[in-house]
Amino acid sequence: MSIKTIVKFETNEIKKSTALSFEIAVTNKAIKDLNKKISTLNQCKNILESSDKNFKLIELTAKWNSINKCCLNHLHNAYLIKYKGNEGYIKHLENQINVEKEKIRYQTSDNLEYEWENIQESAEYQMLDEWEKKNLKSSFEERIAKNEELLEFHLKKLDERIEDFKERGGEFDIEELCKNLKIDYNLIYQD
């Protein structure tokens, strides 16, 4: 074997190993590119699945909204029949407010009168001298005056309910029904 053959043989092996290294590098690069594409496709798949869930949630919310609207319309019609129109509702509202007023008046006046009677009948009160009895009576009268102011404030608030209703147009509509049922009108009618 000559030197030329040996050198040629070595250069062929070097070329083959270089070519093989180059093929490995190209294959590794192709694998990395494919892995990136697979990762991107997996992310797209996850996004599509989550958007599908969101779409289903939006559909359920829309169904819930339409069911609530139908129920409220049915209730509104039933109440209009019950009240025989707006005048009937206004009378009902006035009656309801008068009942609340009487309840407040009865509770506040009855409680204070009962408390004052108990104080006057107690043995401790009987043992007090006239000056202490006067002071106790004046402090109790102050409490009664503050209580009456508070009572007037609550009564005004109740009267304002009718005025507010009349200012809003005085019509028993679905918004008024939602207010009576303590339902958030804007949650259902999100126009």
Image (cartoon, grey):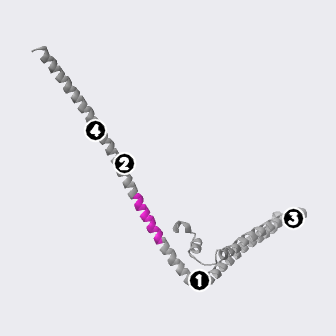
Q: Splitting the image into 4 quarters, where does residue 159 fall?
A: bottom right
Q: From the image, state whether disc 1 or disc 3 is nearer to you.
A: 1
Tag 2, which secondary structure? helix
**Range shown magenta:** 53-67
Q: Which mark is residue 43?
A: 2
Q: CA distance from mark 1 to mark 2?
A: 58 Å
Disc 2 marks which amino acid? Answer: Gln
Disc 4 marks which amino acid? Answer: Ala
Which residue occupies the extreme front position in the image?
4
Position in image of residue 5 (x %, y %): 12, 18
From the image, tell me which residue sits under label 4. 30
Tag 1, which secondary structure? helix
Tag 3, which secondary structure? helix
- Sequence-wise, the earlier of marks 1 and 3 is 1
Q: From the image, state whether disc 3 or disc 4 is nearer to you.
A: 4
Q: Which mark is residue 133?
A: 3
From the image, tell me which residue sits under label 1. 83
Position in image of residue 60 (x %, y %): 43, 65
Q: From the image, state whether disc 1 or disc 2 is nearer to you.
A: 2
